[in-house]
Amino acid sequence: MLEREHEYLRDKLEHPAEARDTDYKSAVKFEEETDFAAKLVKHVLGFANSGGGYIIIGYKEQPDKRPAPDPDMTDEITASYEVTRLCQYVEEYLVGQDRIKIKIYKEEFGGGRYPIIRIGRFPEYPFTCTKDYISKSNGETVLKSGQIYIRTEGAMTLPVKAASEWRQLIRECIKASQEIEAKRPTEEKGGQWERLFSAWVKNENDNAMSEMKSAGFTEGFFKFVIQVPYGLNQIDNTTLLEIAEKSECHNTGWPIGVVMTKREYAPVSLADGIRAVINTGDEFDYWALNNRGHFFFVRSHQEDASHAQELAKGSKFLWFDVAIWRISEIISYTSNLCTELNLKQSDNIKLVLSYEGLKDRVLSVSKPLRLLGTYGKCTEDKYEGDLELQVVDIMPKLKDHVHEIAVGLFVLFDFYKPNRAVVDSIVDEFLNARR
């Protein structure tokens, strides 16, 4: 984008021609309280009230009325055009109003460097001059307080007086108003969707915590939330059920978001989507799929199941190989869900993953032959990480995403740093374990 703008500016230097949005000025050093500086302010106001434009310094009008590089241009003149200095001077004539957006480029061309002043359009209301400037050379009024200036189609900067000039200014006001109105619903709607999403997550989280506690699962869990772009059309619950079934990852015997048919475990239909609560007595799953495509999931720690505790002999563990496997599945599930929701490849989604009940757990492995020993105890009780994901990159960058989460989680266990090759090998095992 920046390179295209520089190409556009170089074209103005290579093919100079004054227009409504472009003016050329000879090689004059910028100095406040001079006739040239006052005329420059006048042009800045005119451009700002006419959709914006460019003022190029260092081009002199030729006998044929066309601008060409001024041989008197120097580096000292170029250096005198500094954006803060110019803005401060312009603002002396805009008391009580918004600031004009001004940017100064210094483009090289033909062995010289030329300041190019870019002026932005007024944000909501036209700019009005608030201070007089009387020429020191001839006593003429260059700037008049209370006057509105515009840049005409004939490449002139004039005070608004004639009917055609008022029509031009009114058109600019209408255009600015339309742009403001076009943005406002999007911002308000975005805020509304965000509030609805936050309220839904809170409701599901409160319900999940209540269900877990009632079922006797108090040792901890991992949880994640997938937030998809707001504004998806509402999805009916029958379709949501199909989406949930197709989003399962078939790399494990107990997939995340599993859709079961047994009545006490099967998803139920709610006003805002579908939900499943699965309590096997030894493990606990809770998931909900919102009718706008968001997903919420909680699972008790597998390490706390009775069969695992028999081997643990009273110790509390977090198995890092299982954690890596599940993180891989979470991200893969996210990719599947995006596919089933027909999201665009360019869409961005947010994944927030947390582990709770970590305090005093020791990092270990579920398969002793993979690595031996234990790797430190956790003194924190909770970990939370988030990923901003673009749909197109979710699976191609799976290992990077998994490693990022794993590093953040495992460092809580006495600064343990997972070996990238080991993490990648477990991700590969997950990917190859199609069932």
Image (cartoon, helix red, strand yellow):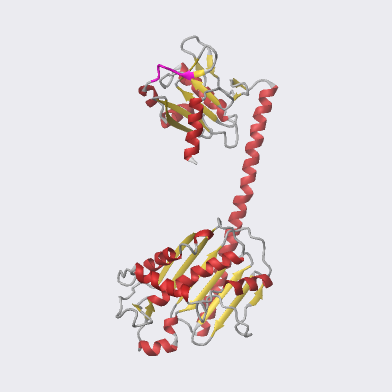
The answer to which quarter of the image holds residue 157 is: top right
13 vs 294, nearest the viewer: 13
* Residue 205 visible from this viewpoint: no
The part of the chain drawn in magenta is 68-73
User: Outermost residue, top direction?
Assistant: 138
Q: Position of residue 297 (x, y in %)?
A: 53, 73
Residue 349, relative to residue 262: is it above or below? above
* Residue 420 visible from this viewpoint: yes
154 vs 100, nearest the viewer: 154
SS majority, magenta? loop
- Please give left or right for residue 49 compared with residue 381 in the image: right
202 vs 289, nearest the viewer: 289
Q: Position of residue 64 (x, y in %)?
A: 54, 13
- Please give left or right for residue 88 compared with residue 272 in the image: left
Magenta stretch containing residue 69, yes or no? yes
Q: Position of residue 88 (x, y in %)?
A: 44, 29
Residue 396, relative to residue 282: is it above or below? above
Magenta stretch containing residue 274, yes or no? no
User: What residue is rendered at 53% in x and 83% in y?
Assistant: 214
User: What residue is rendered at 67% in x and 30% in y?
Assistant: 170
